[in-house]
Image (cartoon, coloured by chain):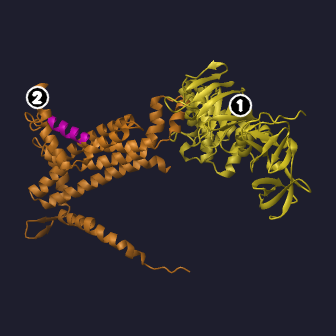
């Protein structure tokens, strides 16, 4: 006869406490701010859903959100196919494997603000190596501090440089797990290189690719440090992504209410898109 | 369908092999009849998978030729050899249905859709998978997956040979038997040359008309299951096939007799040659008990179901005998009798007695 008791809760308690302090309590603080107005001195006035309405209706938020989606879409459209192609062309065995892996991992080991500074110095017109080369050697009119297009290209190239490796390494891990017999069978079945990719490599990479896309989506959607260090959101507002705008509102203008409401909307969008994407990608397996 | 001939085949994984020890395959010369069922049998690492990959074209041999019906295919890639191969682990295309899997090799070769449909239906019928044709292949059980990979080989009606590389390794024991008889049945239906690689003697002996026994990259004997059992050409064959394997007892050869631990044993015929190490080889099945003969001390009796395996000591040598009844007690003294027509002398491993004219 087994006796039922509630002792198991004691084992979960430390984790619950930890999660409460590092996630639930701060989150609730944000919720608290988002429905109130404060003028300092710890005085709060009930605001209801007013901030949410104001944020959602504001042109500024909509523009930043649009830029954010554009940025993320471009990042994914470049990094995912590029990562797959690089992973496919990497050697599977031999001396070059560790060399390639280390080279691939290098960009990811660099701290984010350092990446931003590096690319800033690298691309500055006149003094940066790339900036100088483009302007004074090739004669291309390029200035990421003045032209929105140049700034966008630089931000995107920087992110591709920094994060394509993640997709590469994940895909590579999926690829090396495919037994040789699959390739041999495909040879015997007379499959073309495209068929091998479509029916063997891609299905075997699907799980890791799902994770890669999900991670890249979340990271690029929440990106702050690198573009902030590189362009500071400029020129003008052209590279002001959601997080940069959020920091401006919260810490620049000290509008805690709108900033809190915006954080929650931001969070909800990230969560929703991730969930929809994950559900779609794993739908087939559930059947 | 084709006759397969391997002529002076050698293979080394090293770029510049020097001695015979550098070769994974040493000098192979065999001809396989069109439509036959063959097995390559040997322990792990004996070179049987290397040989299989050479035949299918996944490997190019260092030396020698492979001929399909006298056509030299040594340099051809696998898809131009019209070979089908079933691997140790079932290979299926996860995202396709069973039907699409079966149709895949035909589709790649540009066969017209109507014919593809007909062939797929035929093969599905043969494999008993007709009811699964529209299900996703990824969810199947291992034995069904293995059936599908077999089907992908059989679906082409122009296959020269179907090769099996230990195809039953991942199959549950109770399904192994089923799948094995299915294979045998398929062979009779499609009449393709089939080559089956395994280290399991039961699989080899039940499947094949002729078994090629390999050891250390060398073919030691090619023969029907009965030949391999009744008259092993090498002590390795005698030991590897049979359960328990042949007794290999150090002896001295004297004409048509051998002297083993001081006792004279009649042989099947006169012994050839006079150099090298000699052994007396006799299967436990042909060691009997009697009132006279070689005195032995019984050390162990094992009941393995249909019969008993008796271990006995003669002098300092242990040997095994198989008996169905009149089992001696462990510790007792018995007299062993060796059947003369099944007693042979092996010189450095190879058979050295002449078969007595019958």
Chain colored orange: A
Q: Colour of chain B?
A: yellow
Q: Is residue B261 above or below residue B125?
A: below
Most foreground residue, B266 or B242: B266
User: Magenta stretch mostly in which secondary structure?
Assistant: helix
Q: Position of residue B243 (x, y in %)?
A: 75, 50
Asked if the residues shown at circle 2 and circle 1 are in contact, with their CB atoms under 8 angstroms apart, the answer is: no
Magenta-colored span:
A149-161
Q: Secondary structure at mark 1?
A: helix
Which residue, given by chain and number where applicable, does mark 1 sit on?
B190
Instruction: Please tell me whether residue A253 is drawn above or below residue B155 in the rendered image.
Output: below
Res B101 visible:
yes
Q: Quadrant of the N terminus of chain B?
A: top right
Where is residue B208 drawn, in percent x and y?
Answer: 73, 37
What's the residue at 38%, 42% (across, down)? A171
- Tell me, yes or no, whether the highlighted magenta stretch contains residue A199: no
Residue B311 in view, yes or no: no
């Amino acid at each position: 006869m087994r006796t039922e008791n509630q002792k198991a809760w004691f084992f979960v308690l430390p984790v619950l406490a930890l999660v409460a302090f590092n996630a639930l309590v701060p989150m609730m603080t944000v919720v608290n701010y988002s429905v109130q107005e404060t003028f300092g001195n710890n005085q709060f006035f009930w605001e209801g859903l007013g901030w949410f309405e104001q944020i959602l209706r504001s042109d500024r938020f909509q523009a930043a959100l649009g830029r954010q989606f554009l940025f993320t879409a471009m990042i994914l459209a470049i990094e995912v196919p590029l990562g797959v192609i690089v992973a496919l062309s990497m050697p599977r065995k031999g001396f070059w494997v560790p060399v390639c892996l280390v080279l691939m991992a290098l960009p990811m080991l660099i701290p984010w603000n350092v990446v931003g500074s590096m690319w800033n110095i690298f691309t500055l017109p006149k003094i940066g190596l790339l900036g100088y080369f483009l302007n004074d050697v090739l004669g291309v009119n390029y200035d990421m501090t003045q032209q929105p297009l140049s700034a966008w290209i630089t931000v995107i190239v920087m992110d591709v440089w920094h994060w394509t490796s993640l997709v590469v390494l994940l895909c590579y891990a999926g690829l090396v797990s495919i037994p040789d017999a699959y390739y041999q069978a495909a040879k015997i079945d007379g499959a073309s290189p495209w068929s091998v990719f479509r029916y063997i490599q891609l299905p075997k990479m699907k799980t890791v690719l799902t994770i890669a896309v999900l991670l890249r989506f979340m990271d690029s959607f929440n990106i702050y440090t690198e573009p902030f260090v590189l362009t500071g959101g400029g020129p003008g507002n052209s590279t002001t992504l959601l997080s940069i705008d959020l920091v401006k509102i919260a810490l620049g203008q000290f509008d805690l209410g709108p900033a809190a409401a915006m954080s929650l909307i931001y969070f909800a969008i990230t969560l929703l898109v991730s969930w929809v994407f994950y559900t779609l990608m794993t739908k087939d397996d559930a059947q | 369908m084709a006759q397969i001939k391997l002529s002076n085949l050698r293979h080394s994984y090293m770029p510049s092999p020097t001695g015979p020890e550098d070769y994974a395959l040493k000098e192979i010369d065999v001809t396989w009849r069109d439509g036959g069922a063959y097995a390559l049998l040997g322990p792990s690492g004996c070179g049987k998978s290397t040989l299989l990959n050479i035949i299918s074209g996944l490997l190019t041999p260092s030396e020698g030729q492979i001929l399909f019906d006298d056509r030299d295919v040594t340099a051809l890639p696998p898809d131009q050899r019209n070979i089908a191969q079933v691997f140790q682990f079932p290979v299926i295309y996860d995202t396709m249905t069973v039907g699409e899997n079966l149709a895949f090799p035909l589709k790649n070769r540009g066969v017209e859709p109507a014919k593809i449909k007909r062939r797929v239906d035929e093969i599905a019928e043969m494999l008993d998978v007709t009811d699964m044709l529209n299900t996703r292949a990824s969810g199947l059980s291992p034995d069904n997956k293995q059936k599908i990979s077999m089907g992908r080989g059989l679906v082409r009606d122009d296959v020269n040979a179907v090769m099996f590389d230990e195809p039953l390794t991942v199959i549950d024991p109770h399904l192994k038997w089923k799948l094995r008889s299915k294979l045998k049945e398929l062979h009779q239906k499609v009449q393709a040359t089939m080559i089956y690689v395994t280290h399991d003697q039961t699989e080899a002996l039940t499947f094949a008309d002729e078994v090629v026994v390999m050891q250390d990259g060398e073919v030691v004997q090619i023969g029907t299951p009965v030949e391999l059992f009744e008259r092993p050409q090498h002590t390795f064959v005698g030991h590897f096939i049979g359960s328990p394997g042949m007794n290999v007892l150090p002896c001295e050869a004297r004409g048509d007799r051998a002297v083993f631990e001081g006792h004279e044993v009649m042989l099947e015929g006169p012994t050839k040659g006079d150099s090298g190490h000699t052994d007396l080889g006799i299967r436990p099945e042909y060691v009997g008990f009697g009132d006279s003969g070689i005195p032995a001390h019984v050390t162990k009796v094992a009941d393995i179901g249909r019969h008993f395996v008796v271990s006995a000591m003669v002098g300092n040598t242990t040997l095994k005998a198989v008996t169905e009844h009149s089992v001696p007690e462990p510790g007792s003294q018995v007299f062993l009798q060796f059947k003369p027509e099944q007693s042979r002398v092996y010189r450095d491993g190879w058979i050295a007695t002449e078969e007595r004219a019958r």
